[in-house]
C-alpha cells in the first residue's frame, strides 16, 4: 500500500514568462488572436490584459497552463521584442506537425527580419 504517490504537474515556468512581457494569444475557438501584456503568472494560469478598442477600457483573458500543454493555444511572447518565443513552433511557419515540443519547447525568431537579414527589422 502506498501512502504517497508522485504525479507529473503541468505548470508555467517562471523563468520563461513574467508580468510585463508582451504577449499574443489565440485560442483554437477564436477567429482571431489578441495581443496584450502579461499581468499575472502563477503555476496554473496566466492573465493577459489587452486593449479591446473602446476608449480607455482594458480587458483580459486567462490562459490555463493545461490548455497550452494540450495544444489549444497559439501563443507568442517577448520580454523586449528582441527575441519572440512561440508555441507551437509551427505558428511562425516553421513546419512542425505537432504542438508537442522537444527540449524547453520554445522557438525564438532571434530578432531577424522577414528576409533573414541581421537588421532585426521587417521588410515592408
Image: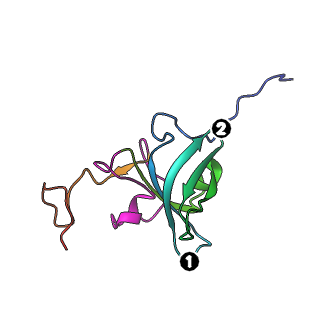
Residue 108, how many percent across, how many down?
A: 32, 51
Magenta span has 85? yes
Q: What percent of the width, then of the height, locates residue 74?
A: 50, 62
Local SS, label 2:
loop
**Measuring 33% from the left and 63% from the top, which residue is drawn there?**
94
Q: Give the range drawn in magenta.
A: 80-104
**For residue 16, which quarter of the picture?**
top left
- Judged by its main secondary structure, the magenta piece is loop
In this orientation, which residue lies closer to the viewer: 22 or 75?
22
Q: Quadrant of the C terminus?
A: bottom left
Q: In which quarter of the image is the N terminus?
A: top right
Q: Is residue 99 visible?
A: no
Label whose residue precedes the other's in the sequence (1 or 2):
2
Tell me the residue that label 2 is attached to: 9
The disc at residue 31 is 1
Q: Nearer the viewer, residue 81 or 14?
A: 81
Q: Is mark 1 on a helix, strand or loop?
A: loop
In the figure, 17 relative to 85: above or below? Answer: above
Q: Specify the farthest residue to the bottom.
A: 31
Does residue 52 belong to the magenta stretch?
Answer: no
Task: Tell me the residue at 51%/41% (across/down).
Answer: 19
Q: Nearer the viewer, mark 1 or mark 2?
A: 1
**Which of these two is toward me, 104 or 110?**
110
Q: Which residue is drawn at 35% across and 52% down?
A: 84
> Badge 2 local density, few (<14 within 10 Å), some, or many (20+)?
few
Estimate the x, y position of residue 13 in percent, counting from the top left.
52, 37
When the figure is inspected, residue 71 is found, relative to residue 124, above or below; the finding is: above
Amino acid at each position: 500500500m502506498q501512502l504517497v504517490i508522485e504525479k507529473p504537474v503541468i505548470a508555467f515556468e517562471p523563468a520563461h514568462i513574467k508580468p510585463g512581457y508582451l504577449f499574443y494569444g489565440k485560442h483554437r475557438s477564436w477567429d482571431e488572436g489578441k495581443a496584450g501584456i502579461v499581468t499575472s503568472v502563477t503555476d496554473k494560469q496566466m492573465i493577459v490584459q489587452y486593449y479591446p478598442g473602446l476608449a480607455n477600457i482594458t480587458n483580459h483573458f486567462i490562459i490555463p497552463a493545461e490548455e497550452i500543454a494540450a495544444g489549444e493555444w497559439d501563443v507568442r511572447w517577448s520580454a523586449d521584442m528582441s527575441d519572440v518565443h512561440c508555441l507551437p513552433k509551427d505558428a511562425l511557419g516553421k513546419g512542425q506537425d505537432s504542438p508537442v515540443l522537444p527540449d524547453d519547447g520554445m522557438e525564438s525568431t532571434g530578432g531577424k527580419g522577414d528576409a533573414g537579414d541581421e537588421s532585426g527589422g521587417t521588410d515592408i
